[in-house]
Amino acid sequence: MINKIWLFLIIISLIYGILTFNMIPLNDAIMEAPQTAFRIFVEFIIFMTFWNGILRMTKDSGFLNVITKYIKKIIRPLFKELDKNDPALDYISANLCANLIGLGSAATPLGLKAMQELDKTNEDKKKPSKAMITLVTLNSTSFTLLPTSILAFRRSYNAQVNLSLIPWILLISFLTTAFALTLNFVFGRFYK
């Protein structure tokens, strides 16, 4: 589906460029796009490698275990149906830690592992459990304390990295997560 959307946008751009006699700027944009995309990709990979390294160091030092211990206590009410020693809670906590520092790429494998653990305790394999839905809700909104990915993208596009944006990003991130969890709670009461 997304390929069709991109194809439609490219065709419309070409038609518009021909009809408005703007083929030179359009041609310049087409020629510069691969270089720009590659530059941004390399900068972003370097940035993500750095933050994944920081996450790895916190894991190896044992600091991640300390953080996840406290996060497990905070998220425990969201996953009432799970046993307090369920290994899924460890993966969910680590997933949330990665999301808190804006590392969606590091959070993804942890979220997948948490989902596998939740699937083991799921009685009806044809539909997700409440805990699985809650995990997807948390990951979709991904509450972030330090929006490293957004700052990296802004920097790669030569936008000013304005730290005054962080409180606003934090507020919006908190509000969307709270709203999604509220909806999850309300509709979860009807889910069987």
Image: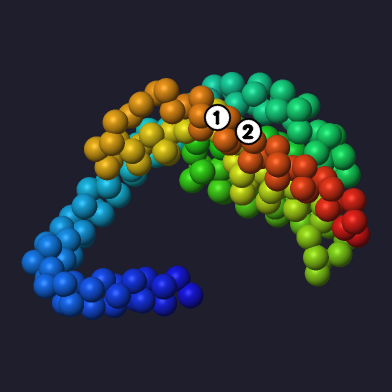
The amino acid sitting under disc 1 is Leu
The residue depicted at 67 percent of the width and 44 percent of the height is 138
Q: Which of the 4 image quarters holds residue 171?
A: top right
How many C-alpha atoms fall within 10 Å of the one at disc 2: few (<14), some, or many (≥20)?
Answer: some
Please tell me whether mark 2 sits on a helix, a strand or a loop. helix
The amino acid sitting under disc 2 is Phe
State the residue position of label 1: 170
Please tell me whether mark 1 sits on a helix, a strand or a loop. helix
Mark 1 in CB contact with mark 2 (< 8 angstroms): yes
In this picture, residue 42 sits left or right of residue 4: left
In this picture, residue 68 sits left or right of residue 16: right
Q: Nearer the viewer, residue 6 or 131?
A: 6
State the residue position of label 2: 174
Q: Which of the 4 image quarters holds residue 100?
A: top right
Q: Nearer the viewer, residue 160 or 54?
A: 160
The picture places residue 166, in percent across and down from the top left corner, at 47, 27
